[in-house]
Amino acid sequence: MDMNWPNENWHPIGDISDIPLRGARCVKTPQGKIAVFRTAENEVFAIEDHCPHKGGPLSQGIVHAKAVTCPLHNWVISLETGKALGADEGQVRTIPVRNEDGALFIALESLMMAAE
């Protein structure tokens, strides 16, 4: 185990090959749905799967660079920070993701702490 990672409970969520380039998959957790995105550069990000505007499913949005465009009203959300970009204001939680040779893990502990 890599000791450089923070002390969190890492939970396996599948393999990077399960997510198409510039695509997403959903992970259901006790705290709600998490959207896990894979960029064209093979970077992986996880955020809450609802747009801060009207709750649109971000996992069904268009991935470009390190952002996703909500399919409902075209809000652009940063995959790195969870913040709405441009003139829009709002934010979703980001969830730490680990990629160990293609095996993906999320830190559910960070979700539980944020929910309290």
Image (cartoon, helix red, strand yellow):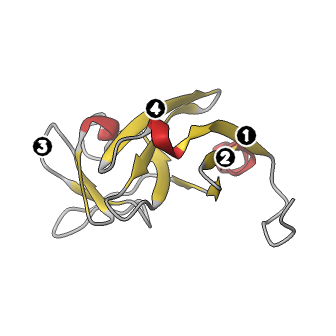
Rendered residue at 42%/40% (across/down): 19
Q: Amino acid at mark 3?
A: His
Above or below, 102 relative to 56 = below
The three-letter code of the residue at mark 4 reads: Cys
Q: Dot 1: few (<14), some (14–19), or many (≥20) neighbours within 10 Å?
A: some
Left or right, 24 with respect to 76, comes to right
Q: Give the mark nearest the N terminus, 4 or 1.
A: 1
Distance CA(mark 4)–CA(mark 1): 14 Å
C-alpha separation, residue under disc 3 versus residue under disc 2: 30 Å
Label 3 or label 1, whichever lies nearer to me, is 1
- The residue that label 1 is drawn on is 11
In terms of secondary structure, where does tag 3 sit?
loop
Q: Which numbered circle lies on residue 26?
A: 4
Ranked by sequence position, the earlier of labels 2 and 4 is 4
Q: Which one is earlier in the sequence, the residue at label 2 or at label 1?
A: 1
Q: Amino acid at mark 2?
A: Phe
Is the residue marked by circle 4 packed among few (<14), some (14-19), or many (20+) residues within 10 Å? Answer: many
Q: For the residues marked 3 and 1, what is the alpha-carbon distance in whole angstroms?
A: 32 Å
Q: Residue at x 35, y 57 (%)?
A: 39
The residue identified by callout 2 is 105
Inter-mark Cα distance, 2 to 4:
13 Å
Which tag is nearer the camera, tag 3 or tag 2?
2
